[in-house]
Image (tube, rainbow, N blue to C red):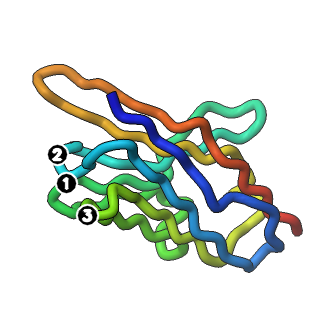
């Protein structure tokens, strides 16, 4: 079991920046993939960014060049730096830990609200 706690959300004007943090209750060094997802009202949850234990990253097309995901295994923390925010980035952002040991287990945080005003 891994508990994930997000922080860093809030209200920001378009063009502004926020940094989200995800603190894990135990070591993330062996967790295959850490990721950030978001869910806007009336929409499905979607992948924003992910980073593997080897450091490979993957981004949604809509955030490429604006968002950066990073993981610090020694701190058991994953960050999402969000720059040049747009109103369409408004959503609840969730931290995800995906463990693959023959089968996949997903752990989720409680989410943090990001609101971007125009």
Q: Circle 2 sits in a helix, a strand or a loop, which is it? A: loop
The residue tagged 3 is 74
Q: Is residue 52 left or right of residue 23?
A: left
CB within 8 Å, label 2 to label 1: yes
Q: Circle 3 sits in a helix, a strand or a loop, which is it? A: helix
| Closer to the camera in the image, 9 or 82 | 9
Q: Is residue 29 left or right of residue 24?
A: left
> What residue is shown at x 72% (from left), y 55% (from top)?
114
Question: Taking 15 as reference, is 48 above or below it?
Answer: above
Q: Residue furthest left?
A: 102
> What residue is shown at x 40% (from left), y 59% (from top)?
78
Give the quarter of the image for residue 42.
Answer: top right
CB within 8 Å, label 2 to label 3: no
| Closer to the camera in the image, 5 or 38 | 5
User: Looking at the image, is mark 2 or mark 1 nearer the viewer?
Assistant: 2
Q: Residue furthest top?
A: 103
Q: Is residue 23 left or right of residue 28?
A: right
> What residue is shown at x 18% (from left), y 20% (from top)?
103
On residue 105, the disc is none
Relative image position of residue 3 (x, y in whole percent): 43, 36
Question: Taking 4 as reference, is 29 above or below it?
Answer: below
> What residue is shown at x 69% (from left), y 58% (from top)?
9
Relative image position of residue 43 (x, y in whole percent): 69, 33
On residue 30, the disc is 2
Give the quarter of the image for residue 75.
Answer: bottom left
The residue tagged 1 is 53
Question: Taking 80 as reference, is 25 above or below it?
Answer: above
Judge the density around disc 2: few (<14), some (14-19), many (≥20) Cα neighbours within 10 Å. few
3D distance between C-alphas at marks 2 and 1: 7 Å
Task: Identify the image quadrant of the C terminus.
Answer: bottom right
Question: Taking 18 as reference, is 15 above or below it?
Answer: below
């Amino acid at each position: 079991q891994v508990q994930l706690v997000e922080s860093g959300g809030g209200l920001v004007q378009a063009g502004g920046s926020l940094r989200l943090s995800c603190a894990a209750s135990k070591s993330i060094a062996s967790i295959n993939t850490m990721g950030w997802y978001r869910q806007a009202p009336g929409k499905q949850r979607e992948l924003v960014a992910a980073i593997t234990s080897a450091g490979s990253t993957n981004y949604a097309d809509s955030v490429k060049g604006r968002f950066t995901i990073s993981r610090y295994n020694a701190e058991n923390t994953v960050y999402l730096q969000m720059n040049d925010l747009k109103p369409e980035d408004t959503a609840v952002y969730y931290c995800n830990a995906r463990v693959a040991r023959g089968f996949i287990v997903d752990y989720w945080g409680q989410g943090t609200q990001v609101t971007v005003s125009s």
